[in-house]
Image (spheres, helix red, strand yellow):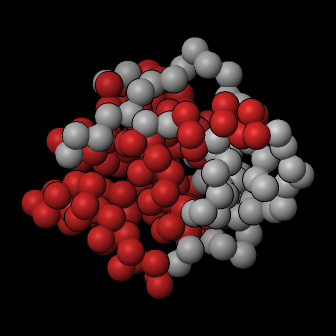
Amino acid sequence: MGHMTPENQMLRKRRSISRDKRLRTGLFGLTTGEHFVVWVFRTWLEGPASRLTLDSAFQVHCGALNAESASECFARLVETLASHSRRTLGFHRAECIAISASERTLLALIAAAQVGNTDFAEAVAEWLVPRDAAPGLVLHATTFAFMLEVSGLRLPLRVAQPVPVADCL
């Protein structure tokens, strides 16, 4: 998977931080939709053995009618990101409560696509991948965002906030 194989993803040990900071910068502040996207992405990176778990999660969160389509849209998004990423992206393990700047960027891309903020989605995509690959990434993010929305999973667009980076325990 390009730059995001488990062998080279940025999953380094991080120093301990205060409980208050973890609550402000970790998964605790995310909506159900955001938490689902982060968990799905982290679980995907664990490899093929985790794919059955993902299928079940898509069934639960997206319903039987939308699960397969949502999963396929997500796979195209990840494959595009993996094959064109400009840099190694930092993602935590699935069980970690912290959230990385790369994970927040992925959420921003999908949220922008979901609310129809094409300019912001394109800017985020061009930060993640080269300009020629950005339209494909935006297309897949938009399709996945639509599947989330029809399943009742909304992602808020958090553009005015600084991007805090939490350390893993």
Locate residue 37 relative to residue 10 in the image: left or right: left
Q: In the image, is residue 6 above or below residue 98?
A: below
Q: Residue at x 70, y 53 (%)?
A: 90
Q: In the rendered image, is residue 89 in sight?
A: no
Q: Is residue 58 left or right of residue 25?
A: left
Left/right placement of residue 3 relative to residue 68 reads right
Please say if 58 is above or below 6.
Answer: above
* Farthest-out residue, top: 160
Residue lying at 10% horizontally and 60% vertically, measured from the top left? 65
Question: Toward the viewer: 134 or 66?
Answer: 66
Q: Residue furthest bottom?
A: 49
What percent of the width, then of the height, locates residue 92? 66, 58
Q: Is residue 97 above or below residue 94?
A: above
Q: Quadrant of residue 4?
A: bottom right
At horizontal 64% and vertical 51% (from top left) the residue drawn is: 97
**Which corner quadrant of the image does residue 72 belong to?**
bottom left
Left or right, residue 122 beside residue 55: right
The picture places residue 139, in percent across and down from the top left corner, at: 34, 43
